Amino acid sequence: MSSSPRTLFEKIWSRHVVTEGAGGMSLLYIDRLLMHDGAVHTFERLRKAGRAIRRPGAIAATADHYVPTATGPGGIADPAIRGMVTEMARHTGDLRIPYFGPGDARQGIVHVMGPEQGFTLPGITLVCGDSHTATHGAFGCLAFGIGSSELEHVLATSCLWQRKPRAMRIRVDGVRPSGVAAKDVILAVIATISAAGGTGHVIEYAGAAIAAMSMDERMTVCNMSIEAGARAGMVAPDATTYAYLEGRPFAPSGARADEARAYWATLPSDAGAAFDAEVTLDAAALAPTVTWGTSPQEALPITGRVPDPAETADPARRAAIERMLAYMGLAANTPLTAINVDRVFIGSCTNSRLEDLRSAAAVVRGRRVVVPAWVVAGSGLIKRAAEAEGLDRIFREAGFEWREPGCSMCIGMNGDTGRPGERVASTSNRNFEGRQGKGVRTHLMSPAMAAAAAVTGRLTDVRAFAGEGL
Amino acid sequence: MSVDAFTSVTAAAVPLDAANIDTDRVIPARFLHKPRGPEYAGLLFHDVRFDEDGRERADFIMNQPAFRGARIIVAADNFGCGSSREHAVWALAAYGIRAVIAPSFGDIFFNNCFKIGVLPVVVSADTAAALRRQLHAMPGASITVDLETQTVTGPDGAPIPFTVDPFRRQGLLRGEDEIALTLGHEAAIAAFERRHADEEPWLAIERRA
C-alpha cells in the first residue's frame, strides 16, 4: 500500500486498473452497469457482431427515457418506440437481468432507481449510457456516462479503456442559508468554474456544506457535474451514506455490510492528498439561483438582472450573450423576477426525489398554480412514498398534474415537451436550445423555486414565501 | 465493429464560432430512437440547419455554398458538451465530417469520436480562432489533418502540431476492433476479477431464477 496521501478518486481508480495500455491508457474494470430503454439497440448490435455479454450479473435495467408519464391507459403510440421498451423486457428476461419496467413500482429514472435499490455502492466503478451517471458518485463511487460503443465494450469485456482523469476538489464551506437548496449550490459551482471548467477532471465535492447534505441533496450536486464539464463527481462516503444504504435490496446486509463498511471507511481522501485543481465556495454567500441563458453556466442569483451584452468587452462573449437573449426572448437588464413563465416542470434525475417533492409541496401548500405545472416523481416508489405523506394531494389541490415516473420533460423523448416559444421553469439539468422541445425556453432552478414560479407565474425568490421546509 | 480508419484528410473546412455547442444542438433528442444509418446525415444540426418547413436556413453557415462540401469543422471551446449520445458523432460521420478541431471537447463526445472514426483534434484557443478567421476570410478553403504526422495544415500553409493518445492514434490508423483487442486481455481480466471478488465479496449480486 502506498504511503503517500491519496484522493478518494485515486483509491478507486487504482483498485480497478486491470492493465496499462500504450501512452497512459488504462484498462479499467467496471463493477456495475445500469441500462435504460434508450440503450436497447446495443443488445441487438452485440448479437449481430456475435459477441456474448460477459457478465449479465453486473447489470440492472429500467425504462425511463421513452415511457409515457400521463396517467391511465394509452401506452406508447409510436410502434417503433413501443418496440424499444418491449425489447428491453425481452432481452433482460433472456439474460436474467433485473429489469424494472412499466407497471413495476420500482420503475423509474435510471439514476433514481440505481441508488434506491442499493445497486449503487461506495468504492465501485459504475457506468451507464447516459451522461447523468455522475449522480451515483454521491455514494463515493466512480460513476460516469458512456456512449453506445463504450457500452458495447463494457457489455462484451466488463472493462473500458480510459485515460486517467485529473482530480479537482470543490469545497463548499459554511452553512446554506434558508431557501438555498442543493440545486442552488451546484448551479453556483457551474457558474463559477464554467460549463467547461471540469473538462478532463473528476470532481470531489467536499466541505461542511456538502457533509451536511442528505443523500438526495448530494445526488443533485453530483448529477450536474457533467454540466460543469466533468464526467464524474463524487462525495466521500460517511454515516449519511451508510444510513441510506441500510436495508436496500442490492446493498450488503449483516456481516457483509460490516465488512463493506470497514473498507468504505478507508475511501475518503487522505489529509494532504494533492488535487490538480481546487475551488472553494462559501455556502453562506449563496442565494436561490436561476439560469437565464442556454448553457447551465449562465446562472445568477434570483435578485439579479439579465446580462447586458453591451457591457461585455470580449466580442465572442458578446455574440454568445446576444444569441442566448434572442433564443430566450429576453431583454438585457430585465430583473429576473420580472420574467413570466408559461409552464413548470418538477422532475428529472436532478430533482425528482422525495425531499425534492417535499420542498416543492411546502411552497405550494394552500396556494394555486397560475400556469400548467407538472410533478413527475423519479420512481414508482417515490411516487408511492409521496402519496403516503399526502404530497400528491397538496400538488393536485394546487392544480399540479401528478404524473407517472420517467425522464419526461427534461429531455422530451417520450413526447412530454413544451410548445415553441414557451418558457419553462424547470428543475432539470439542461437549458440547451430545444432541450425541452423545439423553440422551448428553459430556466433551471430548485424544486422550491419552480414551485414558487408555478404559483406566481414568474421567476420568484422563494425566500419571500413563508412556509416550512424551505 | 472495427472503426473507420483515419490517416490523413484534406478537405474544405467550416468555422463554427460559438462556444459550448452541445450534443442536443448537434442532434435533437427526438431523433435518437432511429438506428444508426445514412439518414443521420440529414439530422446533423437539424434545428439550426432547417426551418419549420424543412427548408435550409440561409443563415446557417453549413448551408452556404462555399461551405457545403466541408468535411472538417473548426469549432470553439467545449464542442460536444452535454449528453452522452453517440448519435451526435453518427450524424457528423454520416454527413461526411472526418475531423473536428477545437480548443476543448465534451469528455464523453471526445471518447465517442474515436469509436466512429471522426478525429477530434485539440489545438490552443488562439490557434482555433486563427483557423476560423482564415476560413471566414477564404470561404471554402481547405485544411489538412494528418494523423500519421499529427499535423494540421491550415489555409495559410503553416503546420500546427497536435497530439493524440498513442493508444487511440494506433486504433484509428489501423481501424482496430477495440473489443477484440480487449478480449485479448481475457486472462488478465479474469485474474483481476477473482482477486476483486475476494476483496469485495459484497459486490456479488444474486440473480433471479
Image (cartoon, coloured by chain):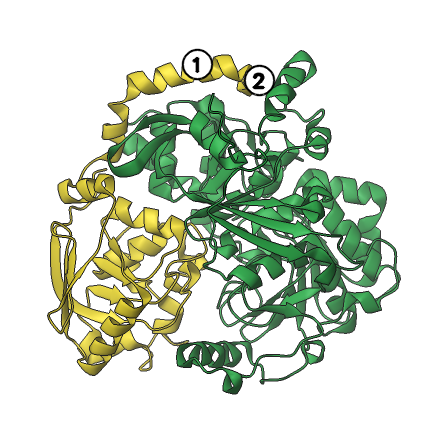
Q: Nearer the viewer, residue A470 or B71?
A: A470
The reply to whether the C-beta atoms of the residues labelled 1 and 2 are less than 8 Å apart is no
Indicate whether B63 appears above or below A257: below
Q: Is residue A160 left or right of residue A436?
A: left
Classify residue B65 as left or right of residue B207.
left
**Pointer 1: residues within 10 angstroms few (<14), some, or many (20+)?**
few
Q: Quadrant of residue A280?
A: bottom right
For mark 1, name the chain: B
Q: Amino acid at mark 1?
A: Arg
Q: Secondary structure at mark 1?
A: helix
Instruction: Confirm whether residue A325 shows in the render.
Output: yes
Q: Chain of mark 2?
A: B
Give residue A104's quadrant in the image. top right
Image position, residue A287 (x, y; %): 72, 64
Which three-letter amino acid code belongs to the residue tagged 2?
A: Trp
Tag shown at residue A437: none
User: What SS does tag 2 mark?
Assistant: helix
Comparing labels 1 and 2, the label whose residue is closer to the camera: 1
Chain A rendering hue: green
Relative image position of residue A27 (x, y in whole percent): 34, 30
- Foreground of the two, B20 or A108: B20
Chain identity for the colour yellow used in the image: B
The residue labelled by disc 2 is: B202
Question: Quick one: label 2, few (<14), some, or many (20+) residues within 10 Å?
Answer: some
Q: Which residue is mark 1?
A: B195
Residue A428 horizontal/vertical position (percent) = 60, 57
Question: Quick check: can you spot residue A252?
Answer: no
1 or 2: tag closer to the N-terminus: 1
Q: Viewer-proximal residue, B36 or B63? A: B63
**Are callouts 1 and 2 both on one chain?**
yes
